[in-house]
Amino acid sequence: MRNLISLMHVSLDGFVAGPNGEIDWAAARGDDELWETLTPILSTVDSAIFGRVTYHLFLDYWPTAATNPSSSRNDVAFAHWIESVAKTVISKSLEKVEWKNTELIAKNIDGEIAKKKQQPGKNLLVFGSPSLTTTLINLNLMDEFRIFVHPVFLGKGKPFLQSLKARHEVKLMASKGLRSGVVALRYGNSGRTAP
């Protein structure tokens, strides 16, 4: 069975984006050490999952990053990786998706993701997408959380997880402090929930 993994960058005060959707605070710490921490995660994944907002953020940058002369070598490597993997967008408002190797799921999210978890292949990775991640936690479908806590207080913005319907216990599997001040955390779903 494939694991469903959440990968999220979070500020110290619990936001994943600023009040206007800003993520420059996370990108500013995208150094070689952070990429070296991300690469082993990506090597276990062959399918990327996005909510609508994160899909558009990725679509605006990554399809052309590999050929952009100002892209870093890490950006180029990731651009090649993201182009090659299967991509799924979960959205009730989108009518179509335009990126290569991308499908759209608009209904029966729990059934469709559960089916993907049963298919052969590597793990499934949800990039960002805090609303979608909340939904998948509420559906008890999330297996693992890769959380990168950045040394910044945003004051306000988009909360990490909002509208969880119950308490969900997780277990710490690993933690690593990076030179940039980012702390990489890995949690597994313990399977215990409470109302």
Image (cartoon, rainbow, N blue to C red):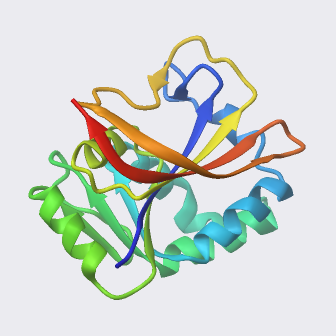
Q: Residue at x 62, y 17 (%)?
A: 154
Left or right of residue 160: residue 192: left
Residue 37: where, in percent of width, then height? 74, 60
Q: Is residue 43 left or right of residue 115?
A: right
Q: Residue at x 83, y 36 (%)?
A: 181
Seen at 27% across and 63% down, the residue is 97
- For the point 59% across and 11% down, the residue is 155
Q: Is residue 178 visible?
A: yes
User: In x, y percent, where is residue 13?
Assistant: 60, 19
- Examine the rendered structure and indicate whether residue 87 appears above or below residue 27: below
Which residue in the rendered view is the most extreme toward the bottom?
120
Residue 163 in percent (x, y) is at 28, 26
Please tell me in which quadrant of the rendered image residue 2 appears: bottom left
In front: 186, or 113?
186
Relative to 1, say whether 105 is above or below: above
Q: In x, y percent, where is residue 91?
A: 22, 50
